[in-house]
Amino acid sequence: MNTRIPPVDFGRRVLVLRHRRIAILLQWRSVVVCAALAVAVAGTAVLALMTGSYALSPGQVLSALTGRETGIVHDIVVEWRLPRVAAAVVFGAALGVSGAVFQSLLRNPLADPGLVGFSQGSYTGALIVILVVNGTYVQLVGGALLGGMATAVAVYVLAHRRGVQGFRLIIVGIGVSAMLESLNTWLILKADLDQAMSAAAWIAGSLNGVSWDRVVIGGACIAVLLLLAGMLSRPMRQMELGDDAAASQGVRVSPARLGLMLVGVALTATVTAASGPIAFISLVAPQIGRRLARTAGITLTPAAFVGALLCLASDYIAQHVAPTPLPVGIITVVLGGGYLGYLLFTEARRRL
């Protein structure tokens, strides 16, 4: 008797990676899209390393990166420009994943850590460290993390009523965000002029002050958090169907949601501590990644690559295309604001 089991039809072409008893299924289109985005990120990074007051050729950049250049070319590429490029890639990927987590949890394409107050909480914590404690960078990271986490817990508790519904959490988050914004304004008004100017410049979101120390510390934190996000992301698809449907499939909804929220807040807080709040990347990247990969729900990997490319390209425009060098946060606000308008317009047309 022939007992051969027919192959499973997944509906789309998938790539199966097996290692002993562990198997990972990847859609071929997502793999191709992520590979194309990685090439685009690498090309933009080389362009950013070439461009500046001291122009370099692609060969000089690649030689400096592989250790075959010494002297001024090595210093320009490795010591001056590479930290900024690495920060844009790492921080953009972190913001893309953070936005993907919240949009999946809240089942809303407008869900953004800045919209529900978590970015404002991180900013409040960092602002207290800057204006009150006058602390170091490590203390700044700790303050941003504590501020973001405290805000997330407060929003979660206030929105909890026989479970947490996405719409209620967004409404509560908007209210908490408005309160924290008022508190931040009051802190800046009460500060000394120099401290207030420093805080006001920092709030625009800029990579100007990023050094290797910040890239290494922030990158290590973000690497751990991205690994946690990948490990916790398994029930995201079921939770997008609703709490009851996810619970019927064996998902412990409340612990899974709380764990993903904490990871998402920590990613946003780490980036905020290093560069200030860089707006709209966490809103835009997940939706662009979803449309490119044509996945049924929000997925983390395309969102990370799109976020990295958006942050890097925005910083290049801010530094080399704009009439005068600008903080990267201003460019992301312009790009994200246009995308938000497009999203609202298409949503309104769909409902008519």
Image (cartoon, grey):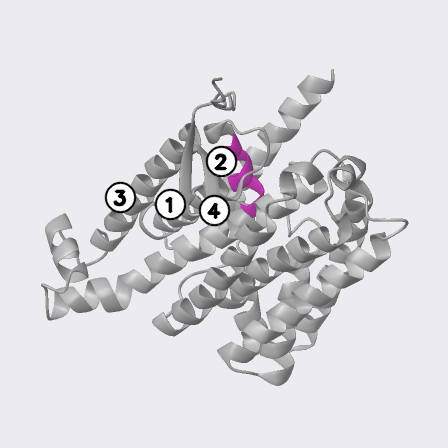
The residues tagged by marks 4 and 3 sit, at their Cα atoms, a distance apart of: 37 Å
Across and down, in percent, residue 135 comes to 55, 83
The first of marks 4 and 3 along the sequence is 4
Across and down, in percent, residue 53 comes to 21, 58
The first of marks 1 and 2 along the sequence is 2
Choose mark 2 or mark 3, whichever is in front. 2
- The residue under label 4 is 21
Across and down, in percent, residue 59 comes to 11, 51
Image position of 30 with respect to 56: above or below: above
- Mark 1 belongs to which amino acid? Ala
Q: Is residue 108 visible to us here? A: no
* Residue at image location 70% in from the left, 55% down from the top: 117
- The residue under label 1 is 313
The first of marks 2 and 3 along the sequence is 3
- Mark 4 belongs to which amino acid? Arg
Of residues 258 and 95, which is closer to you in this image? Answer: 258
Of residues 253 and 78, which is closer to you in this image? Answer: 253
- The residue under label 3 is 43
Marks 4,3: beta carbons within 8 A: no
The residues tagged by marks 1 and 2 sit, at their Cα atoms, a distance apart of: 16 Å
